Amino acid sequence: MMSSPYPVVRLKPKSDDRAIRHGAPWVFADEMVVDRRTKALAPGTIAQLQDAERRPLAVVGVNPGSRIFCRILDRDPEATVDRDWLAARIDSALALRERLFDAPFYRLVHAEADGLPGVIVDRFGDTAVVQPNAAWADALMDDISACLQARGMGNVIRNGQGRARTLEGLEELTRVEAGAVDGPIQVPMNGATYVADVLGGQKTGLFYDQRPNHAFAARLARDARVLDVFSHVGGFSLAALAGGATQALAVDGSAPALELARRGAQLSGVAERFETRQGDAFDTMTALSQEGESFDLVICDPPAFAPNRQAADAGLRAYERVARLGAALVRPGGYLVLCSCSHAVDLHKFRSASTRGIGRAARRGQLIHTGFAGPDHPMHPHLAESGYLKSLVYRLVD
């Protein structure tokens, strides 16, 4: 057997290595032998992981300062993680997306599920927005950028913001790594044109994960009056208008997001049927109800109310409240779409909270559809949290 060029890190005795051999993507700090030498490894170091008997298991990215001590990069313990290795992983991810989509607007890399732990890449034509949310990826950002440039993405943006980087002990940093981006980017999707602020917008600028749920809601929107709450840049409302809605009202707390939504409506040719209302979502739904407003289709797509397990109970109460307020605004025979992107709240709990909220509004519903993230957001079979997005569609029969 060839010796690895990488330093060695080792599992504790009696640690269960079977999960790693069967495809688990992480090793936590409490499973590792953490001696002085291991603690001294720089965050992002590539290492060889061995079991307690010194048998090689995998090549990993190490971060001694994170609860996730090792991220499995390659189950071949003799693999070399370099630019060629990155290119092969990106090519594999690209092959799936090119089969799925006709235009180059999609999530190109979805972290562990695409074999690049902690790495998110959203593609906007010739622009790639990269979130290197793991120390090993942050250290190899130049190589990641070069691989993307070689595959038609001459503009590469590093988006180094968010909770995931904080947990890794990484600095917040957003900058253009290659090329030039001079403003928001137009994105065609579901018959509408969206405007994504890839430099200053939320996350990477657009939520591709909701694409199939936008499409399903659009099927319900023909000749309908639509309310899109927590609308961001108009994800559901612009799709609904493209699907034949007579009118759509987008509600969000962010004035810049609503301005992008209005630009998208103009580009989509539906501006005369599109309105916006800035304000707190809960307050606005309450006010609309007091004003006697009602809609044929109400969509509520809030941010993650439960970003971790500690926030799960409070998050479920918030989802129940959203369902109650949203249901009160739906006309009899209309539809209510409720979404959750909280990985700490599973589908069963989210469905229960949503159904309770509808009941508290004194409405009777039929659950007609359950949606998830699109196929450019594949699930890692060992990570339940990679199936974070849930969408429930109710028909309120009275």
Image: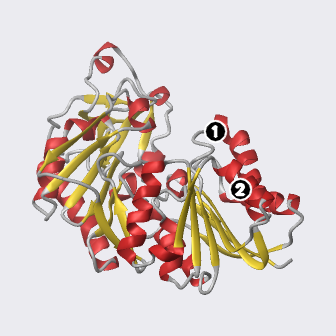
| Residue 387 visible in image | yes
In the figure, 30 relative to 5: above or below?
A: above
| Disc 1 residue type (three-letter) | Arg
In the figure, 332 relative to 199: above or below?
A: below
The residue sitting at 33% across, 45% down in the picture is 200
Left or right side of 141 for 362: right
Location of mark 1 (residue): 309
State the residue lying farthest toward the top: 36
Rendering quarter of residue 295: bottom right
Location of mark 2 (residue): 285
| Quadrant in which the C terminus appears | bottom right
User: Which of pointers 2 and 1 lies earlier in the amino acid sequence?
Assistant: 2
Question: What's the mark number on residue 244?
Answer: none
Which secondary structure lies at badge 2? helix
The residue sitting at 45% across, 77% down in the picture is 270
The one of 306 and 273 positioned closer to us in this rendering? 273
| Quadrant in which the N terminus appears | top left
